[in-house]
Image (spheres, rainbow, N blue to C red):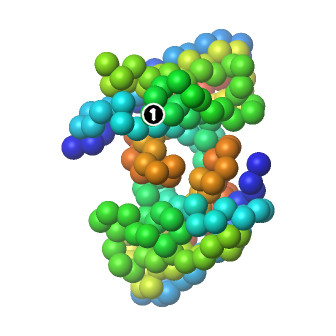
Amino acid sequence: EVVMTQSPGTLSVSPGERLTLSCRASQTVSNDLAWYQQKPGQAPRLLIYAASTRATGIPARFSGSGSETEFTLTISSLQPEDFAVYYCHQYSYWPRTFGQGTKVEFK
Amino acid sequence: QEQLVESGGGVVQPGGSLRLSCAASGFALNSYGMHWVRQAPGKGLECVAFVWRDGIKKEYLDSVKGRFTISKDNSKNIVYLQMDSLRAEDTGIYYCARDVSWYIEVWGRGTLVTVSS
């Protein structure tokens, strides 16, 4: 099983800040990597797929990069609606696996 | 509008069974593979089962193999998850999700399964 490790576990930030979330895969997953945002009581929402492609309707302040085993999600200027948990997800191997999540909370 | 709506969750005793349903609207299931993804209370996401577009080939998380069965009825546009021999660790919200080019694109709102005596 491919283990996905996200860091940090929690980020305390203020609106307007730039933040970078990291995700590491225990073996190479090429660019078969997606990022999801989940708010309390809601289903996850697709942000990024193929490591760097924004999903339909996702604002340009969200960007993804990386390949093989190291990936990042960057939010250029945090908006109030961006406070949530973010998950990375590899879809290169079965079973599909997710990272444990990074919680972005209000400082 | 493309939508997935899950149903069938509830409280069941350990060793019991439940069948979850996921009704798709706004698109045809015969064009997509479909996932069931679960989330234990306060925890992360876990892919439990996947059925390929043809409805024949299936993938399962090791911990549910032999206990869970995923299927889809393309004529009714519904995906099912039959869950037998349920354990406390199967407790969580179960999401139905649509696969596009191997990543999960569309999610339902989920249905809660609680396994408890």
Which residue is depicted at the point 53% across and 61% down? A34
**A102 versus B43 height, above or below:** below
The image quadrant where one finds the C terminus of chain A is bottom right
Q: Residue at coordinates 43% horizontally, 58% vertically from top-left?
A: A46
Of B12 and A59, nearer the camera is A59
Front-most of A6 and B61?
Answer: B61
* Relative depth, front residue between A1 and B54: B54
Residue visible at 33% across and 74% down in the picture: A59
Q: Residue furthest top?
A: B16
Q: Name the amino acid type tagged 1.
A: Arg
Task: State the image coordinates of residue A50 (x, y, percent, origin top left).
Answer: 51, 65
* Whole-percent x, y for residue A82 in the image: 43, 70
| Residue of label 1 | B53
For disc 1, the neighbor class at 10 Å (few under 14, some 14 to 19, many from 20) is some
| Circle 1: element type | loop
In the image, is A96 to the left or to the right of B31?
right
Q: Position of residue B95 (x, y in %)?
A: 49, 38
Q: Point out residue B60 in the picture as x, y percentages from the top left corner.
A: 66, 32
Q: Quick check: A81 above or below A76?
A: above
